[in-house]
Image (spheres, grey):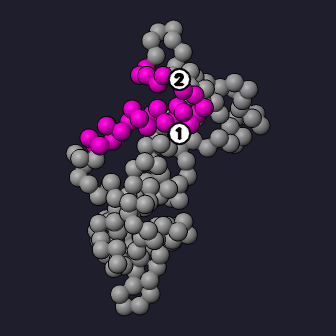
Amino acid sequence: MKFSAQEEYGLRCMVAMARHDRDKAMNIPDLARAEKITPAYVGKLMRILRRGKLVESLHGPTGGYRLTRPASRISTGEILAVLGGRLYEPGICKKYPGDTPFCIHNSGCAIRSLWAGLDLIVGEVLSHTFLADLVRNEKTLSQWIRGQIPSLVEAAAKAAGSQARVAGPPRRGETPPALRAGVRA
């Protein structure tokens, strides 16, 4: 799983803005210097984030961009969705690039169930991690996330319509947790 440069740098710009005084705008040159990326690329990212209603532009000599809401009310899932979309798009199998007009595994695909399950779990983590959380230091955030994972995985299983026990990797011959939880594309 990889995140695009647009998602990575867009999220970095949002974190820089969250660290900044919310009442004051950050301009493109300041964001570019802070994140060591070109002003043109920052401009592109800000346009995307503005269209997604995550930042607003302010005009004038002290203009620039600022968050539309407090950092504690903007989830990382929302930011990444604006910048690039979901990890797994349910319609991906309809865009099959193979020799046939559709994937040969379209009627029953375990891989699709894996991606859908991962999307649920990652989506839960991202929807419960807010921009304000990313302002923390790495060690503190890492500990916080590790502490949250069991409850977030359980929430993802419930979101899939199951009260099934969510455990670690299945034992040999055991049904994988995502299948026990009813995760289907």
Magenta-colored segment: predominant secondary structure? helix
Residue at the top extreme?
Answer: 173
Residue 46 seen in render: no
Q: Where 114 falls versus 42 (above or below)?
A: above
Q: Quadrant of residue 179?
A: top right
Secondary structure type for disc 2: loop
Asked if residue 172 lies left or right of residue 90, the reply is: left
Q: Of the residues shown, which amino acid type is indicated by label 2?
A: Ala
Query: Foreground mark, 1 or 2?
Result: 2
- Write the start and end of the magenta stretch as one range: 142-169
Residue at 26% in and 54% down: 136
Crowdedness near tag 2: few (<14), some (14–19) or many (≥20) residues, C-alpha within 10 Å:
some
Marker disc for residue 167: none
Asked if residue 99 lies left or right of residue 157, the reply is: right
Q: Mark 1 points at which residue?
A: 119
Residue 156 shown in magenta: yes
Residue 110 shown in magenta: no
Q: Are marks 1 and 2 in contact (CB under 8 Å)?
A: no
Q: Name the residue under label 2.
A: 164
Q: Which of 37 and 25 is in front in this view?
A: 25
Residue at 43% in and 60% down: 73
Residue at 34% in and 58% down: 132
Q: Where 77 falls versus 166 (above or below)?
A: below
